[in-house]
Amino acid sequence: MPAPASIRASLPFADSFPRTPFQVGTGAHALDCRPGRPDDDSAAHVMGILNVTPDSFSDGGEYVTVETAVSRAAEMLSEGASIIDVGGESTRPGADPVGPAEERDRVVPVVDAITEAFPDALVSIDTYKPEVARAALRAGAHIVNDVTGLRRGPDMALVAAEHDAPLVLMHSAGAPGDLTRPRDYDDVTAAVREALAQAVDTAREAGVPRVIVDPGFGFGKSDAENLRLLNTVDALLALECPILVGVSRKSTIGRTLGTPEAPVPVDERLYGSLGATAAAVLRGAALVRAHDVAPTVDMLTVLGAALQRS
């Protein structure tokens, strides 16, 4: 069998991929997040979604106790998740806003319990509130995932820098609670790349050691723009940051499989999610955010094996 590094060389646009190592975490938590993952057989790392909310669009209310959340984290880790992403506020349209104290009360006990039960697991905190991120990092989280991409100010970057934590910057527009309404873009890929470049500069100026970018699939884009972003993920490689893509069960998947008037239900979007994920990885995504961890890991393992034989 060829060396795993051949996965990376076989990906489209391989010549534009960063050649310098990019690790998330250190020691037992270290992940090589270059496209193609030259240290592993799989084509990308999986970030398992753990919503400890009563109202998330897909799994709201399922993991609202510490016990059920830790059980779900254990399941995802056993299925091959590299990161557990803990979120305490839904970003679905119409979701009720959550204050910092309530969100902190939801996520901190879960982060603390997961990191105690699984000390080798990487945990990220999905929040745009600096005070929640700081509390979660103190409880043991390793990564901050900001869906506003620092648009609410540089304080989140300062928190990440203070804790030497990698920071995920997602492209979005509008205020929390209104992040998914489509906006007007002349060129969605160029607009996303420009906005993320500015956010990356802000994070680096604040001293953030490692930055990950996310094009924000489903956040403020039309279905056509979401699909175009999937096909142009490689344009973000110029930012020299690992790319995270979250397409799992999104509305665009449902409308593409069905119609705008009658999208397929959330629980019937697995295969569409896997197809979109594969497209993003083939364009350079090194991390993928998923609800359905086991099928996603299986798909990426086969994709990596096929690319090794290219």
Image (cartoon, grey):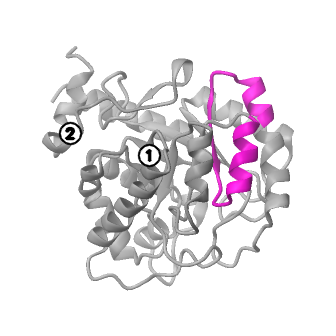
**Quarter location, residue 229:** bottom left
Marked residue nearer the N-terminal end (1 or 2) = 2
Res. 207 in view: yes
Q: Secondary structure at mark 2?
A: loop
Which quadrant is home to the N terminus?
Answer: top left
In the image, is residue 144 part of the stretch drawn in magenta? no
User: Which amino acid, mark 1?
Assistant: Val
Asked if the magenta segment contains residue 132, the reply would be yes
- Reading the image, the residue beneath label 2 is 11
The answer to whether the residues at label 1 and label 2 have Cβ atoms under 8 Å apart is no
Label 1's element? Answer: strand
Q: Nearer the viewer, residue 6 or 125?
A: 125
Please report the residue visible at 79 percent of the width from the left and 41 percent of the height from the top.
110
Q: CA distance from mark 1 to mark 2?
A: 22 Å
Give the image location of residue 241, x and y in percent. 35, 45
85 and 69: which one is in front? 85
Who's the residue at 66% across and 65% down the image? 57
Relative horizontal placement of residue 91, taking residue 290 as reference (left or right): right
- Compared with 69, 25 (above or below) is above
Q: Callout 2: 10 Å neighbours few (<14), some, many (20+)?
A: many
Q: How far across and down, in percent of the image, does residue 52 sit?
A: 76, 52
Task: Indicate the amino acid at tag 2.
Answer: Leu
**What residue would you read off at disc 1?**
211
Magenta-highlighted residues: 112-139
Give the side of residue 182 with respect to residue 286, left or right: right
Q: Residue at x 79, y 61 (%)?
A: 100
Q: From what the image shows, is residue 277 above or below residue 171?
A: above
